[in-house]
Image (cartoon, coloured by chain):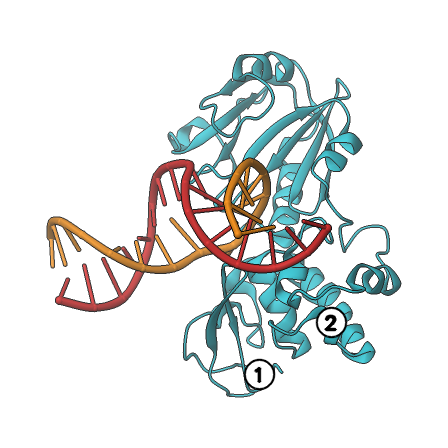
Chain colours: A cyan, B red, C orange
Amino acid sequence: MPELPDVETFRRYFNKTSLNKKIVKAEAVRSRVIKGISPQNLQKKLKGNTFKSTERHGKYLIAATSGNKFLIMHFGMTGSLSYFNDSEGPMKHVHLLLTFQNNYKLAYRDPRTFGAIYFEENKEAFLKRKKLGPDPLKGNYSFSSFKKAAEGKKETLKAFLMDQTILAGIGNIYSDEILFDAGIHPEKPVNKLSKSKSKELFSSMKKVLRDSIKYEADASNFPDDYLLNYRKKNAECPKCGGKIKKITIAGRSSYFCPNHQR
DNA sequence: CCTATAGCCTGACGGC
DNA sequence: TGCCGTCAGGCTATAG
């Protein structure tokens, strides 16, 4: 699930539940997803702190602590956050469990353990180390930057949109969704796109990402002209009635409508 | 440099 | 109902 709109939804959830509350206990339950710091050390660093603010970059959620350090979370394919109290019972697949002064807990969960948790002194250095490109919804990301990034690229648009070093935040689902909205074939080479089509792609990108955040990245909230609920072979295209096709691009299963995406 | 592929894990789903 | 194979929305390391 967790691409840019999902992570932004987690961020808002985190803000609503977990800011400005003292962490009285930190349990790093399993260590696989905790990177660059030992679970014991992470527990020590978090205990007694509060979270002061959050930001997101691409698929990363960055929470600033009162100690001016950063808890940085990536949600892999199956990561999520749950805020709950003890009456709601034990939870499975918890990797980091924080207990606040009000006795509520925040759990970072991830069954498939492809996610990652970091604790960093310097968030800019972290983003640099990860070689992340700009976040398309931050800092007024412009068409001219987009065009410049696309210059001379021969790869498919699908691969281009998912490349985190070019743009941070778009994954398999939303790259499909953006191309579906713009009416462009996912295998079209980047350098074969006309200027007007590339403008359309750019505006579809912003629109799809922004609107998906409004829908809280929840499939049940999406309007019917989105591809999301039609990601099945031979489904009927909700835009034009064509037959949805499934192909593999850059190792990922991609759904599109050959009738209106060319 | 660039592109393609395997592998990391667990759970859900469809077919028999 | 149960078992088994396949697939899953990410990322990295490695090979060519």
Residue linked to disc 1: A239
- Distance CA(mark 2)–CA(mark 1): 17 Å
Say left or right for A200 vs A14.
Answer: right
Q: At x 60% / y 72%, what residue is drawn?
A: A187
Marks 2 and 1, the one that precedes in the sequence = 2
Label 1 Cα neighbours within 10 Å, binned few <14 / some 14-19 / many ≥20: some
| Label 1 secondary element | loop
> Could you tell me which chain the residue with mark 2 belongs to?
A
User: Mark 2 vs mark 1: same chain?
Assistant: yes
Question: Which mark is on residue A100?
Answer: none
| Label 2 secondary element | helix
Please state which amino acid type lies under the numbered disc 1: Lys
Residue A16: image quadrant is top right
Q: At x 54% / y 83%, what residue is drawn?
A: A258
| Residue A127: percent from left, percent from top | 74, 37
Residue A30: image quadrant is top left
Which sits in the foreground, A155 or A13? A155
Say left or right for A245 vs A181.
Answer: left
Residue A66: image quadrant is top right
Residue linked to disc 2: A201
Q: At x 78% / y 30%, what residue is drawn?
A: A125
Q: How many marks?
A: 2
| Residue A42: percent from left, percent from top | 59, 17
Label 2 Cα neighbours within 10 Å, binned few <14 / some 14-19 / many ≥20: many
> Could you tell me which chain the residue with mark 1 belongs to?
A
As displayed, is residue A48 above or below residue A210? Answer: above
The answer to whether any part of residue A54 appears in the image is: no
Q: At x 60% / y 68%, what residue is drawn?
A: A177
Please state which amino acid type lies under the numbered disc 2: Leu
The answer to whether any part of residue A127 appears in the image is: yes
Which sits in the foreground, A90 or A3? A3
